[in-house]
Structure formats: C-alpha cells, structure tokens
Image: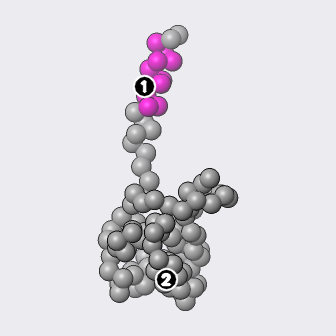
C-alpha cells in the first residue's frame, strides 16, 4: 500500500513541474481579491519598460495593432495586464487606454496578500 502512495506522490510531484503559466516572471503588486481564469491575452510590462504579449517581446508602437489582431475573433476579448510594481502608472494607463478604445475587457494582475 505504501508503495502505491509513494508512486502517486512521485507522479504528482513530476506532473506539477510540467505545469507552467504563460507569463513573464515579474514582481506583481499586492491586493486582496480573486481573478477569473478565462481565455485571454497577457500583456506584461517589465521594470525596464519592455512590453510582452504573452511571452513575445513587442515594440510599444505595435502593441495596439497586435492586440487587435490577436483578439479580433474572441466574443469577449480580455487582456490580463501584468505590470511590475516599479513601472510608472502612465505605461499601465497606456495599455488600459488601448483596451478602452477597442472595447477589450482588461484585468490587472496582482499578487494576493
């Protein structure tokens, strides 16, 4: 019996390492509350002000056109905005403005308390 439990433990430990999130490793601000997990596009802003759509780096000038192309077929287009704590607010607002202009839902990703 303990052999089976041990094998299951090893299986789940190995399987959990294969599960990865589709995101850039950044330090998120903290907040209480929960987010929903739906099909969406992640926009990440690192502290050196580089922009990423999912894991692909992109120029700021191409951000809006790339988002429109990626979300044009979605019935409820959603952007998950992941900005590091040290990113100035005007860069975050720039992405929110793009979402507002194109009627995209935007979710600000935060680290839970």
- The label shown at residue 90 is 2
Where is 34 relative to 45, above or below? Answer: above
Q: Position of residue 13 (x, y in %)?
A: 44, 31
Where is 49 relative to 111, above or below? Answer: below
Is residue 18 at all visible to an observer of this figure? yes
Where is 47 relative to 3, above or below? Answer: below
Picture quadrant of residue 14: top left
CA–CA distance between discs 2 and 1? 47 Å
Looking at the rendered image, the disc whose residue lies closer to the viewer, 2 or 1, is: 2
- Residue at position x 34%, y 71% from top? 48
Q: How is the image coloured?
A: one colour
Q: Residue farthest to the bottom?
A: 101
- Residue at position x 39%, y 81% from top? 63
- Residue at position x 53%, y 86% from top? 97
Residue 19 shown in magenta? no
Residue 7 shown in magenta? yes
Part of the protein shown in magenta = 3-13
Q: Position of residue 28 (x, y in %)?
A: 50, 61
Q: Position of residue 18 (x, y in %)?
A: 39, 42
Q: Nearer the viewer, residue 111 or 7?
A: 111
Q: Position of residue 73 (x, y in %)?
A: 49, 77
């Amino acid at each position: 019996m303990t052999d089976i439990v041990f094998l299951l433990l090893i299986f789940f430990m190995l399987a959990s390492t294969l599960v990865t999130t589709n995101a850039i490793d950044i330090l998120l601000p903290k907040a209480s509350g929960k987010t929903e997990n739906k099909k969406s596009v992640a926009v990440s802003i690192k502290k050196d002000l580089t922009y990423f759509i999912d894991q692909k780096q992109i120029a700021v000038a191409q951000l809006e056109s790339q988002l429109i192309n990626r979300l044009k077929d979605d019935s409820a287009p959603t952007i998950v905005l992941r900005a590091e704590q040290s990113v100035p607010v005007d860069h975050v607002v720039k992405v929110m403005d793009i979402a507002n202009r194109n009627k995209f839902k935007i979710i600000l990703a935060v680290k839970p308390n």
